Amino acid sequence: MEIPNTAAAKQRIVLATFGSLGDLHPYLALALELQARGHEAVIATSAAYRQKVEALGLGFRAVRPDAPDIEDQPALMKKLMNRWRGSEFVVRGLIMPAVRDSYEDTLAAADGADLLISHPLTYAVPLVAQVRQIRWISTVLSPLLFFSRYDVPRLLPAPVMSALNALGPKACGAFIGAMKWTGRSWCAPLRQLRAELGLPPVPDPMFEGQHSPELVLGLFSEVFGPRQPDWPTQTAITGFPFYDQEEAGAGLPSELARFLDDSPPPVVFTLGSSAVMDAGRFYEQSAEAAQQLGRRAVLLIGRDPRNLPKQPLPPEIAAFTYEPYSELFPRAAAIVHQGGVGTTAQALRSGRPMLVMPYAHDQPDNANRVVRLGVARTISRSQYNTKRAVQELTLLLGNPAYAQKAAEVGKRIRQENGVKAACDAIEAA
């Protein structure tokens, strides 16, 4: 569906989101562009992000639940990153117990709004849109969330998914139907709230009900997630909306810049902004693997000091907390990461090959997609150790086909402008 780029009068646009920096950054990118076009852009999300949002000159409204303090709760992080139950815990354990609070906060944030934009986990937005009769646009960050029977989510081990796909759309549709049946009880508090508000029942809010009947923005590249026949007809695929600054105007620190100026390019090891809180021995094993390979390396260890390898690092390996991927990744030989869609998008744009070690949620599906593109290899979290990392990186870096394909895909991604395309669509709506 093509949306014409039309001029629009100044609007108050509220962008709601929930989750990690990977869930916040795309909406910051959109809000900054909308603001540059003369609109009033407001981010509605967990109170923990207030300072970051307001430092960019954007409006902010706090919406419960607040992001959990995962740095001090390792057990909670393990629940969030569990391969099989992590998504259930996010919905049932975090969001649904606070759905009434979310509704009240979103209702307040929507005062004077001309348009609401929702994230897949901001379940209160459609309710507020109906109660206040405000126009609503939904977004999808990962292709998985369309739950297509023609491109079924890769949630089970690869051999099982390959066999399922070989059976065709009918069998895949039955698999998705089983997913819906399993998750139906997760959103019971939301259905109860709808009934109390006098709103009619709608399709499952985690599946069809997440999509606005007016416009759905697929905030990813069609290279990464090709359009499928059973996606909503009102879907516009925009390309990735990139934003990765921890602080406004921040760039690479001089120490890292000097390290990168030396040669050869390093392997970058990162676990994004969430999985990094449940790193285990990832960084220690990665440093050992880099040494055995004779490779320089950059470890992005986050703010948890426990992620720093216990042994002193040699000069060829440098550790930092968080650095902008857009400046670091293009200078890497390869990128090893957890498969979050934000990290994956930046790795794709950099044109560098990658090794993906997915945890949970959309990460296994994202990993499968980059493998299918020919730009990556993948390894399960349970199998990641020094020996296997050496083996996988030897295959990745030793086969020029990965680097060649990654460069081709990176060029295509860089030719897209996801922020512009999304904001053109928003203005047209």
Image (cartoon, rainbow, N blue to C red):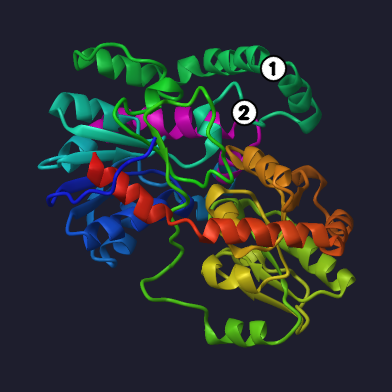
Question: Which residue is nearer to you in this view: 173 or 205?
Answer: 173
* Residue 101 in view (yes/no): no
From the top left corner, tell me how far across and down residue 90 is, in percent: 49, 34
The amino acid beneath tag 2 is: Asp
Q: Position of residue 293 (x, y in %)?
A: 87, 70
Q: Is residue 11 left or right of residue 360?
A: left
Q: Which mark is residue 168?
A: 1
Residue at (32, 28) in percent of width and height: 212
Q: Is residue 305 left or right of residue 241?
A: right
Q: Residue at label 2?
A: 151
Which of marks 2 and 1 precedes in the sequence? 2
* Residue 278 in the image: above or below residue 366: below
Q: Answer with left or right where residue 175 lies relative to residue 391.
A: left
In three-dimensional space, the C-alpha distance between marks 1 and 2, rounded to whole angstroms, equals: 10 Å
Q: Quadrant of residue 153?
A: top right
Front residue (pair 205, 139): 139
State yes or no: residue 64 in magenta. Answer: no
Question: From which residue to which does the magenta span run?
Answer: 77-104
Q: Quadrant of residue 80?
A: top right
Please say whether residue 89 is one of the residues in the magenta stretch.
yes
Give the residue displayed 39% in from the left and 70% down from the top: 247
- Please state if 312 lies on the left or on the right of 95 as rendered: right
Q: Dot 1 lies on which element?
A: loop
Q: Is residue 237 above or below residue 50?
A: above
Q: Is residue 295 visible?
A: yes
As drawn, 230 above or below 383: above
Dominant secondary structure of the magenta stretch?
helix
